[in-house]
Image (cartoon, rainbow, N blue to C red):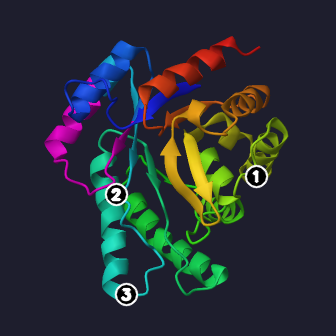
Amino acid sequence: MKFGTAGVPNCSKDRSTIGGIKTIKELGLDAMEVQFVRGVKMKPEMAKNVKTVAESLGIELSVHAPYYINLNAEDEKKMEDSIRRLIDTVRIGGLFAKKIVFHPGYYLKSSKESAYRRIRDSLGYILEFVEQRGLNVELRPETTGKPTQFGDLDETLSLCQELGLKPCVDFSHIHARMRGAVNSYEEFSKILERIEDALGREAIKDMHIHVSGIEYGLKGEKRHLNLRESDFRYEDLLKALKDFGADGIIIVESPNLEEDALMLKRVWKDLR
């Protein structure tokens, strides 16, 4: 299992993407998720430089697409903008990373079934764009933390099954969405069983995971916390992953980023 941060580590004096990658290497971490969450502003030449540096240092990169994506938008322009933002992420992020993580959208006034169909159809268009250009990228829909957002575990797995995708499983989001449930070794193990049942063993051997401490309420996720300042049982999660033979990347989204990432990596190495 590889461990990394969501964005440039806090301790990095050079706040650029390349500076962050170098700091990840210095810290002894393995991965970094490049944050396009406020928009895709990186130029193609810089993206190629990012790839060169990451490959030379053996750091695996992924990309998080902009937050301003709703593939179930009611307004036609918002829908077009959402598709464009995801395509821009694929076009630029795909120059240095394979895994493209994104939040699919919101239910708004739609039923869950209607939202699912619209998001599935919009993704079909984007997947066609990827296929036509022969791009080596994977779209990874993320499980989300609020009941107003599309992205509970069932619909995420169904979407992946139907479109031939793999998910980004944010266990902290699932915990928050369920208002404190799904926080034990047994419950984490059941999630892994459901992933394997839906998508096969390959999905367990190539996981992309988000973890952080998390504050939640009746409406789900409120904000990220440091792991030791939250009730999230990260040791149970790591034990379930280890016992299940899971492999892949764990990206930490806690405010202290590299501290929690390094702590998780130490716990993982100590597990038997």
Q: Which residue shows up at 31% across the image and 33% down it?
A: 8
Query: Would you name the residue on which mark 1 appears?
Result: 181
For the residue labelled by badge 1, is the local secondary structure a helix, a strand or a loop?
loop
For the residue labelled by badge 2, is the local secondary structure a helix, a strand or a loop?
loop
Tell me, yes or no, whether the highlighted magenta stretch contains residue 37. Answer: yes
N-terminal of the two: label 1 or label 2? 2
From the viewer's perspective, is the residue at label 1 or at label 3 nearer? Answer: 1
Residue 173 pos. (x, y %) = 60, 52
For badge 3, the amino acid type reads: Asp
Query: Would you name the residue on which mark 2 appears?
Result: 133
Label 1 Cα crowd, 10 Å radius (few <14 / some 14-19 / many 20+): few
Residue 41 vertical position relative to residue 185 in the rendered view, above or below: below
Query: Would you name the residue on which mark 3 appears?
Result: 75
Task: Identify the image quadrant of the C terminus.
Answer: top right
From the viewer's perspective, is the residue at label 1 or at label 2 nearer? Answer: 1
Question: From the viewer's perspective, is 179 left or right of 12?
Answer: right
From the viewer's perspective, is the residue at label 2 or at label 3 nearer? Answer: 3
N-terminal of the two: label 2 or label 3? 3
Label 2 Cα crowd, 10 Å radius (few <14 / some 14-19 / many 20+): few
* Pick the front one: 202 or 239: 239
Span of residues in magenta: 33-53
Residue 217 vertical position relative to residue 197 in the rendered view, above or below: below
Q: Which residue shows up at 39% across the image and 15% down it?
A: 27
Residue 241 vertical position relative to residue 101 in the rendered view, above or below: above
